[in-house]
Amino acid sequence: MNMNEKNKVENCRIEPKLKLINMDSVEVEQIEWLLYPFIPYGKVTIIQGDPGEGKTTMVLQIIAKLTRGEPIFPVTDTTMKTKEKRSDEVDSGVSR
């Protein structure tokens, strides 16, 4: 095979045809969240930030907690009291 034939073979790339879809045909689906509204189940999540901000540490901590069956954020007495207080305010019509 000479050089010209070799270049023709290399330049003859088979590309898949682009499939266009109409947004009318896209079905709306309910999203389930691991951490609302930041990390959905079954979707791609991008963790973005400057170097040294703790992206890797955060992801490793989330993975470790999930594999042990622990909640991502610990629920303490303080957080429960805060939620109860806010719930009482909503029920009584008290605004901030």
Image (cartoon, rainbow, N blue to C red):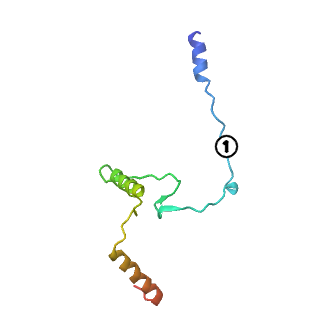
Give the side of residue 42 with respect to residue 77, left or right: right
Q: Secondary structure at mark 1?
A: loop
Write down the quadrant of residue 30 in the picture: bottom right
Camera-side residue: 35 or 80?
Answer: 80
Count numbered badges in the picture. Answer: 1
Instruction: Give the percent coordinates (x, y) of residue 18.
Output: 65, 40
Give the side of residue 58 with respect to residue 33, left or right: left
As displayed, is residue 47 above or below residue 85? above
Give the side of residue 34 with respect to residue 14, left or right: left
Camera-side residue: 74 or 91?
Answer: 74
* Residue at the farthest left position: 52
As displayed, is residue 78 above or below residue 17? below
Camera-side residue: 11 or 64?
Answer: 64
Write down the quadrant of residue 4 in the picture: top right
On the rendered image, what quadrant is the N terminus found in? top right
- Kind of residue at badge 1: Lys
Instruction: Give the percent coordinates (x, y) of residue 27.
Output: 66, 58
Reading the image, the residue beneath label 1 is: 19
The residue positioned 66% from the left and 55% from the top of the image is 26
* Residue at the farthest top position: 2
The residue positioned 57% from the left and 17% from the top of the image is 7
As displayed, is residue 78 above or below residue 26? below
Label 1 Cα crowd, 10 Å radius (few <14 / some 14-19 / many 20+)? few
The residue positioned 58% from the left and 9% from the top of the image is 2
On the rendered image, what quadrant is the C terminus found in? bottom left
The residue positioned 36% from the left and 67% from the top of the image is 74
Instruction: Give the percent coordinates (x, y) of residue 41.
Output: 51, 57
As displayed, is residue 32 above or below residue 21? below
